Amino acid sequence: MIITVDILKAIAPGSKKTNYKLLPDLAKWMSYCFPMYDIDTKGELCHFLAQAAHETDSFNTLEEYASGDAYDTRTDLGNTPQKDGDGRLYKGKGIFQITGAANYKILDIKWNEQSPGEKKSFYENPQLLLLPKYGVWRACEYWKQKEFNDIANMPDTAEIPSKKLKRMVSPLEYITLKING
């Protein structure tokens, strides 16, 4: 399926006209990446695009609005408490808002394994995830890693155990909790 600007506008009517310049690149890179990650059924597309629209404030931003200061002492994210500024530097970026120094380092490994001729360091240059090409790629990588295609293809009435909530949840709740608990 080809993702178009009109599809993204229809999914996220809150997309501001001033930010429509972001939509063509997002549509282009989604259309490019989705087939490589087998994101191609109605359920997969609906779930992915709904999560993407939510995380990007209706495709208005690829960066978390908060300052990131709250992440400065989050050693569970790989941030170094004694190094002031890790929270701001490694705050949420990309379509699914990757957060934390450790996650940016992991992206370096994944990207450089897949694209050895195009070396990149997201850790050294976190702003790369503000470019739709990398923001979409990272979201697709996360989608694949978490095996969300299987979940997205379940009926809406399906129930999946949530360790975090200690109860059964719907596929929508499950994916949402994993992307942004």
Image: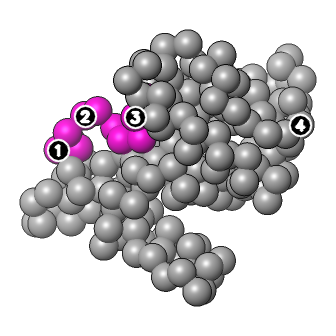
Figure quadrant of the N terminus: top right
160 left or right of 78 in image: right
Residue 138, percent across and down? 56, 56
Disc 1 and disc 4 in contact, CB within 8 angstroms: no
Q: Nearer the viewer, mark 1 or mark 4?
A: 4
Q: Residue at x 58, y 50 (%)?
A: 136
Residue beneath disc 1: 69
Q: Residue at x 64, y 50 (%)?
A: 29
Q: CA distance from mark 2 to mark 1?
A: 8 Å
Q: Is residue 157 above or below residue 141?
A: above
Q: Nearer the viewer, mark 3 or mark 4?
A: 3
Count neighbours of disc 3 (C-alpha within 10 A) and say few if under 14, some if 14 to 19, many if 20 or more: some
Q: Is residue 76 visible?
A: no
Q: Which residues are magenta?
A: 60-70
- Three-letter code for the amino acid on which mark 1 is drawn: Asp
Q: In terms of secondary structure, where does tag 3 sit?
A: loop
Residue beneath disc 2: 66
Chain-order first, disc 1 or disc 4: 4
- Three-letter code for the amino acid on which mark 2 is drawn: Ala
Disc 2 and disc 1 in contact, CB within 8 angstroms: yes
Chain-order first, disc 4 or disc 2: 4
Residue beneath disc 3: 61
